[in-house]
Image: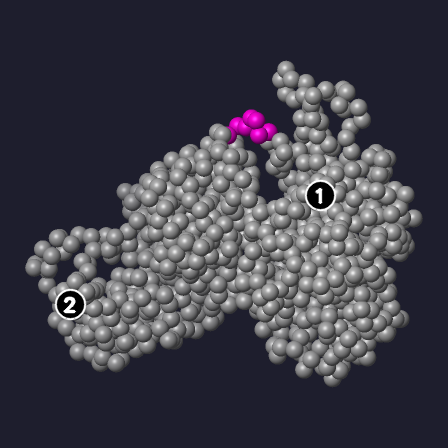
């Protein structure tokens, strides 16, 4: 930024230093506030775009403390890219006040006193401003606005009072007028900012810049050059439990009448008198209203309405014979000299084949093209402005075909905002809500909707909406996952004159011609038959995860090296309710059966089979496709595979999946690591298929490639430790206390209602109760051979702990125990030679109480060791893994899910810089309370010959970590004695060597001697 422009910017933002601000989020406990409003305010805070003297009040009907509100919104803020310490500082600004209702005058009066108190105690700014964000339903606008007006408006001389109001702004002309009358009675248009978040999107705001700052744009922006204008909104999912709300409004009210119509006015408007500055808001909205005034009421002849099959199956929809459209395509006619005769098409739909929002302008045929290029079909130019996903603008332009041919083919001139402007920087494009709230703070109205705009838009749409509802107009049914009703494509071709170039596919800057690609050819599969995601590898885990995805409404194609499992999985899908799952018998058909960009989950055996499968499938894949390895894989292998696929621009993720066969089917814990853009491609699928808990779905982006595998590896290490700890307690109960299997089952079931509640405790009592079906005598557990198997993740965990200099004695002892258990014959021989101690006396009830305390304390140590290991790797590899998020992902679905995990997540959230879980005040208190029981348990085991390696090592870890000084001074002195390794002193800095005996000679220069040796801490 130049000095002049920097000076101008500083002047424009001077108010940030000279004013105070009170923000009130009305409806603070709702989804909109948690998912959009508070994250947007956090972004402004992190960018220093809120005044230093800012307080954010939440208001709703739910009774909560300040801290309880912070706990509710914290998980949503942690999902953003802001540093944990920034999140916590922002949360410290957030407070909460409740009322009996949104119009509770007394509650608002009390809150207004808090505003005044904050302002009176402030540093004496020039202004103290108040911003009210109404994230509430329109049916409570009236009482809320009245209460704000009576109690909370700022004195004009002291600062502004502004209200942000969320849609819907009515459901027809009549309801809009009622709503608008309510607001206008209390506020002027200067107070009101009706937010339509589409007007805050980068590409929407870019429309005016593209049009009015480029010479050539305005010269072709007219009916002489443009064939048609198409505005599209598509979602690949249905109502998903929101059908009750959606059925009252439908796709026309939800998307077309507001979002797309607003964008249309920006495309079609004439040049405003000014585009920036204090007069821009009125100037821009005046020309937008002029466009709306030129549009006639929409008739049924200008509409194609659709409803996806299964829409009414949503349990929240009461009217199962509903005619509510989930798809609509409308033609609007802009009757101005510039646009007369040019069809404007707006279309939107749910449960379609992709997620997309764009403006597509198709130009007319090139002049004299049939004579200049006889016998050749010359594609039309198109300008495409994509609003989501990945904002971009590109012009489809004809160029010469490569080689000896002179045939024109279509390529593109393209700018992707993420890759062009943010690829080499930590900055990112602000989201729409962030941008719009900042506009409100600056008093900029241009990107907000004025009352006359809304009035005219309802005049255009209400006649059509009334006719649909009063005449029960039936929508055309269409299959989920396709393009929508076929009649819509026919309509756009016939009415708009749109011509599709079937040979052109846009892939983020890569032009793909169907006649020639760098990948192996694949069979032709109709677009309507293609699936959203594929899964290759159909052992039971693979089958169950595929059925999980299908049961959540995602169309799945499955494949496997041996084809009978494909048939089996397809049959299971039919038996479980005709789930949207198909099978493919070979790699080419499998890849061809997936929608672009293709998304494939691998669940095959780790190691060489993964490499072979990737080689086989990637031969048919294209740039922008994604492979996800869901197996238990050694993290360097995932990093290596990502590099191998990089030249083909195929994305790769490693994703840990925990939960076993049951979890895979009903909701596992998912731990993905890889490119963020890859995670974004499948986030909607993973969040639906993961285990669901009170803190949200047990999945979240962990970091770059390798991080997901690493977290899963450590998860399995903790699992090793937890299982061994339970086994040691079982050993004491059975072999020392002589309890029966049924008695032990009762005890473990009782413990599962306490702080020890966990999946592993739950399955323990179920295992202990299971009678043997083979012999009909006794319990199955007594017939199980005492040899524990392992697949490698526990060994990897201990190897990594050693590599990262992180102590993990609980998990290491569990691994040792498995290895000793494997030497069954040696142990049987040793049992005849090595004597057991004489059993002492003890109190059974006291032992049981001590065991419970020791087991809990040891479990805490196991988690502490695992999380320390993840942090060490994250720091070394630059992964920036959020430990609180790791603990949250483990709260459901996975093998180690336990009652104490939410407490662990909370501890790490409260103090993201916590050095070790043991020193968290809460856990430290619990461990200190259980310390004596822990020691008695270990002593009892040792004195009675019961091996308790993990219980003992956990206590050792606790005792070593709690001591300020260890006997390591002697060990280091010994190293210096026999090897001249030097040591550090407690009383002065530097490295030292002692001539311990007369025989020791000088070791020379200490720095040279110790080069390359570093004491790891």
Disc 2: which residue: 776
Q: Is residue 440 visible?
A: no
Horizontal side of 814 relative to 506 (left or right) equals left
Residue 594 is one of the magenta-drawn residues:
no
- Look at the numbered discs 1 and 2 and tell me whether their residues touch, using CB distance below 8 Å: no
Nearer to the camera, 912 or 568: 568
Disc 1: which residue: 492
* 10 Å crowding of disc 2: few (<14), some (14-19), many (20+): few
Question: What is the magenta segment's predominant secondary structure?
Answer: loop
Residue at x 75% of width, y 55% of height:
300
Nearer to the camera, 796 or 552: 552
Q: Is residue 826 visible?
A: yes
User: Horizontal and vertical percent for residue 919?
Assistant: 45, 66
Q: Tell me which segment is drawn in magenta.
A: 513-519
Above/below status of 1 relative to 150: above
Residue at x 86% of width, y 65% of height:
189
Q: Earlier in the sequence, mark 1 or mark 2?
A: 1
Horizontal side of 735 relative to 967 (left or right) equals left
């Amino acid at each position: 930024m130049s000095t002049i422009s920097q000076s101008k910017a500083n002047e424009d933002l001077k108010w940030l230093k000279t004013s105070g601000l009170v923000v009130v989020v009305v409806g603070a406990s709702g989804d909109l506030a948690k998912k959009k409003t508070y994250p947007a305010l956090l972004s402004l805070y992190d960018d220093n775009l809120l005044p230093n003297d800012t307080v954010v009040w939440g208001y709703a009907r739910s009774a909560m403390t300040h801290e309880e509100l912070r706990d509710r919104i914290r998980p949503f803020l942690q999902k953003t890219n802001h540093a944990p310490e920034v999140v916590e500082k922002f949360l410290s600004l957030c407070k909460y006040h409740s009322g009996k209702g949104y119009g509770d005058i007394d509650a608002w009066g009390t809150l207004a006193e808090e505003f005044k108190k904050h302002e009176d105690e402030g540093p004496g700014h020039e202004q103290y401003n108040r911003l009210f964000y109404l994230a509430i339903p329109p049916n409570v606008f009236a009482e809320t606005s009245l209460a704000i007006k009576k109690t909370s408006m700022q004195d004009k001389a002291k600062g502004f009072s502004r209200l942000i109001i969320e849609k819907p702004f009515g459901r027809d002309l009549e309801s809009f007028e009622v709503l608008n009358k309510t607001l206008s009675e209390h506020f002027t248009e200067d107070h009101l900012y009706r937010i339509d978040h589409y007007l805050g999107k980068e590409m929407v705001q870019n429309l005016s810049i593209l049009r009015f700052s480029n010479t050539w744009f305005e010269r072709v922006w007219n009916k002489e050059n443009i064939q048609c204008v198409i505005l599209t909104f598509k979602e690949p999912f249905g109502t998903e439990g929101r059908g009750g709300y959606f059925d009252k409004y439908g796709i026309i009210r939800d998307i077309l009448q507001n979002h797309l119509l607003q964008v249309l006015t920006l495309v079609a408007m004439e040049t405003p008198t000014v585009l920036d500055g204090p007069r821009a808001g009125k100037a821009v909205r005046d020309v937008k209203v002029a466009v709306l005034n030129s549009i006639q009421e929409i008739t049924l002849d200008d509409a194609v309405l659709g409803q996806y099959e299964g829409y009414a199956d949503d349990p929240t929809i009461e009217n199962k014979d509903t005619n509510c459209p989930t798809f609509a395509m409308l033609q609007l006619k802009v009757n101005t000299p510039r646009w007369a005769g040019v069809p404007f098409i707006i279309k939107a739909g749910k449960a379609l084949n992709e997620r997309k929002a764009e403006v597509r302008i198709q130009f007319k045929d090139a002049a004299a093209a049939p004579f200049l290029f006889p016998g050749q079909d010359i594609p039309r130019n198109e300008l495409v402005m994509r609003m989501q996903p990945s904002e971009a603008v590109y012009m489809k332009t004809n160029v010469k075909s490569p080689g000896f041919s002179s045939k024109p083919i279509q390529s593109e001139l393209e700018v992707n905002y993420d890759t062009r402007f943010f690829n080499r920087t930590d900055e990112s494009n602000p989201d729409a809500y962030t941008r719009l709230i900042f506009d409100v703070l600056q008093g900029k109205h241009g990107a907000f909707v004025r009352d006359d705009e809304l009035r005219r838009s309802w005049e255009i749409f209400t006649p059509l909406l009334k006719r649909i509802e009063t005449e029960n107009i039936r929508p055309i049914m269409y299959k989920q996952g396709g393009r929508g009703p076929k009649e819509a494509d026919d309509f756009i071709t016939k009415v708009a004159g749109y011509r599709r170039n079937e040979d052109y596919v846009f892939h983020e800057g890569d032009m793909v011609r169907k006649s020639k690609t760098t990948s192996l050819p694949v069979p032709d599969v109709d677009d309507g038959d293609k699936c959203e995601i594929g899964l290759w590898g159909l052992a039971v885990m693979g089958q169950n995860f595929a059925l999980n995805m299908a049961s959540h409404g995602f169309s799945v194609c499955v494949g496997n090296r041996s084809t009978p499992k494909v048939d089996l999985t397809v049959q299971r899908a039919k038996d479980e309710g005709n789930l949207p799952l198909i099978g493919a018998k070979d790699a080419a058909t499998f890849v061809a059966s997936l929608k672009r960009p293709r998304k494939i989950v691998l669940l095959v055996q780790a190691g060489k089979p993964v490499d072979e499968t990737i080689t086989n499938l990637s031969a048919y894949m294209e740039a922008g496709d994604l492979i996800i390895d869901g197996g238990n894989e050694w993290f360097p292998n995932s990093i290596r595979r990502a590099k191998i696929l990089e030249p083909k621009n195929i994305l790769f993720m490693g994703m840990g999946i925990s939960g076993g066969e049951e979890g895979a089917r009903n909701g596992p814990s998912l731990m993905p690591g890889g490119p963020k853009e890859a995670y974004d491609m499948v986030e909607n699928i993973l969040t639906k298929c993961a285990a669901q808990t009170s803190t949200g779905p047990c999945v979240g982006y962990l970091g770059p490639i390798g991080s997901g595998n690493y977290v899963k590896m450590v998860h399995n290490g903790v699992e090793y430790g937890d299982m061994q700890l339970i086994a040691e307690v079982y050993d004491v109960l059975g072999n020392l206390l002589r309890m029966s299997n049924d008695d032990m089952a009762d005890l473990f079931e009782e413990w599962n209602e306490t702080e020890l509640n966990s999946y592993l405790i739950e399955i323990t009592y179920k295992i202990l109760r299971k009678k043997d079906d083979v012999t009909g005598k006794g319990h199955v557990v007594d017939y199980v051979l005492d040899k524990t198997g392992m697949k490698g993740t526990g060994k990897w965990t201990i190897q990594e702990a050693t590599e990262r200099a992180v102590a993990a004695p609980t998990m290491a002892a569990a691994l040792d125990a498995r290895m000793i258990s494997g030497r069954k014959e040696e142990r049987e021989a040793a049992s005849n030679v090595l004597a057991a101690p004489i059993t002492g006396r003890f109190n059974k009830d006291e032992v049981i109480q001590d065991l419970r305390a020791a087991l809990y304390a040891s479990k805490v140590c196991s988690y502490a060791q695992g999380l320390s290991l993840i942090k060490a790797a994250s720091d070394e590899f630059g992964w920036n893994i959020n430990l609180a998020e790791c603990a949250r992902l483990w709260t459901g679905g996975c093998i180690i899910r336990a009652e104490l995990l939410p407490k662990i997540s909370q501890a790490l959230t409260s103090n993201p810089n916590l050095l070790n879980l043991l020193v968290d005040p809460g856990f430290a208190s619990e461990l200190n309370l259980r310390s004596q029981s822990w020691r008695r348990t270990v002593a009892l085991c040792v004195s009675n010959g019961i091996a308790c390696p993990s219980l003992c090592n956990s206590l050792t870890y606790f005792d070593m970590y709690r001591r300020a000084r260890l006997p390591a001074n002697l060990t280091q002195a010994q190293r210096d004695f026999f090897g001249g390794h030097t040591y550090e002193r407690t009383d002065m800095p530097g490295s030292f060597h002692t001539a311990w005996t007369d025989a020791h000679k000088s070791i020379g220069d200490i720095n040279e001697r110790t080069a390359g040796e570093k004491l790891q801490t």
